[in-house]
Image (tube, grey):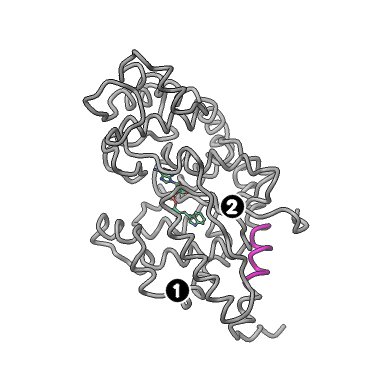
Amino acid sequence: MENTEIKKRIFSGVQPSGNLTIGNYLGSIKNWKAFEDEYEALYCVVDMHAITVRQDPATLRRRTYETLALYIASGLSPEKNTLFVQSHVPCHAELAWILNCYTMFGELSRMTQFKDKSKKYASNINAGLFTYPALMAADILLYQTDLVPVGIDQMQHIELTRDVANRFNGIYSDTFKIPEGFIPKAGAKIMSLAEPDKKMSKSDANVNASVYILDGRDDIIRKFKRAVTDSDTVVCRAEGKDGINNLMTIYTAFTGKTDAEIENEFSGKGYGDFKLAVGETVADALAPVHAEFDRLMADKAYLETVMKNGADYASYLANKTLSKVYRKVGFVQKPR
Ligand code: TYM
């Protein structure tokens, strides 16, 4: 049902390009439920972004369902939020093409994610990987979005979205709302457990570097037990203690405890006790998500109803912006 324009709008998305990590969870999905009543929210499974890196088709298809199921299993109600798959709403590709023509080569060249991924996937530096931020700008701008809740790594893309929107508005008069990024207080950048100076990533080749949302309890606890820390023994946040700082951030994000409370709780205890407590806390918090995920994955028909309803409503909103854009750039309306 259409929002009567009173509520502000939220848009965000996750790529179904790997097993989602607790970085994805804490940086994005977990925080989305809090917006449910105050905002009108659209959350997308961005499958078109995912193919900027080579994907196995059957795996991509499965992960698209899984990502949608994880949105719901993490607490997002499909009645209160619009949940959909990007490729089901062709306006994303159509607006992306237009925005490509208003996004500068130099701007795209400066994107750190592009630079990182070009190194990582050196044999497949395709044009889509380069123009990816224009597709992301289209995702956001199509819905006249006010707020985009993401992890820190996506803020540069949101800045670019704002620049492109301002540029377009400057040429053609107000067309797009200028969105703001939103990052959580704890969890905006969860680091790898194996190399705590690197972001935790779903595409990390080392499976022990990342805790996946769907990891079993024993795996979660084992991974935290072997998390790389330092040669000190005191649990406290300090420069140079990247591993412990990261574990404290994860613990805070799941429990709401402050640094001082954590330091107090583990004073006189060693890293071993702390790592076990973090592992158990994460496993406990994810257990209900797992149960709900399994239930949803066994009910594809329900997931498909959610996808369809979400895409229908998203298309309705997206078409309004797209037809405005087509008019403004000078495309002739198709005669009826
Ligand atoms: P993606 O799929 O890489 O990640 C999904 C979300 O998870 C966040 N995230 C993290 N947060 C904290 N710590 C980490 N280690 C960590 N790793 C990932 C990301 O910041 C993101 O919020 N381009 C986006 C997807 C996208 C999108 C959009 C997002 C496409 N269109 C429009 C918002 C609005 C991406 O690749 O996210």
Occupied quadrant, residue 233 = top left
Q: Residue furthest top?
A: 268
Q: Which residue is mark 2?
A: 84
Does the magenta-highlighted stretch encompass residue 107? no
Tell me which numbered mark, 1 or 2, is placed earlier along the sequence.
2
Residue occupying the point 52% across, 66% down: 162
Q: Nearer the viewer, residue 236 or 111?
A: 236
Q: Residue furthest left?
A: 231
Label 1 Cα crowd, 10 Å radius (few <14 / some 14-19 / many 20+): many
**Region of the chain picked out in magenta, as a range:** 313-322
Q: Nearer the viewer, residue 299 or 275?
A: 275
Q: Position of residue 27 (x, y in %)?
A: 47, 42
Dominant SS in magenta: helix
Picture layout, residue 33 above or below residue 263: below
Q: Position of residue 164 (x, y in %)?
A: 50, 71
Q: Secondary structure at mark 1?
A: loop
Q: Nearer the viewer, residue 80 or 189?
A: 189
Mark 2 and mark 1 in contact (Cβ < 8 Å)? no
User: Relative to residue 149, is residue 130 drawn left or right?
Assistant: left
Picture layout, residue 98 above or below residue 332: above
Residue occupying the point 52% across, 28% down: 256
User: Relative to residue 215, is residue 234 drawn left or right?
Assistant: left
Q: Position of residue 314 (x, y in %)?
A: 64, 58
Q: Which residue is mark 1?
A: 103
Does the magenta-highlighted stretch encompass residue 319? yes
User: Which amino acid, mark 1?
Assistant: Thr
Residue occupying the point 25% across, 58% down: 119
Q: Indicate yes or no: mark 1 CB to ligand 1 under 8 Å.
A: no
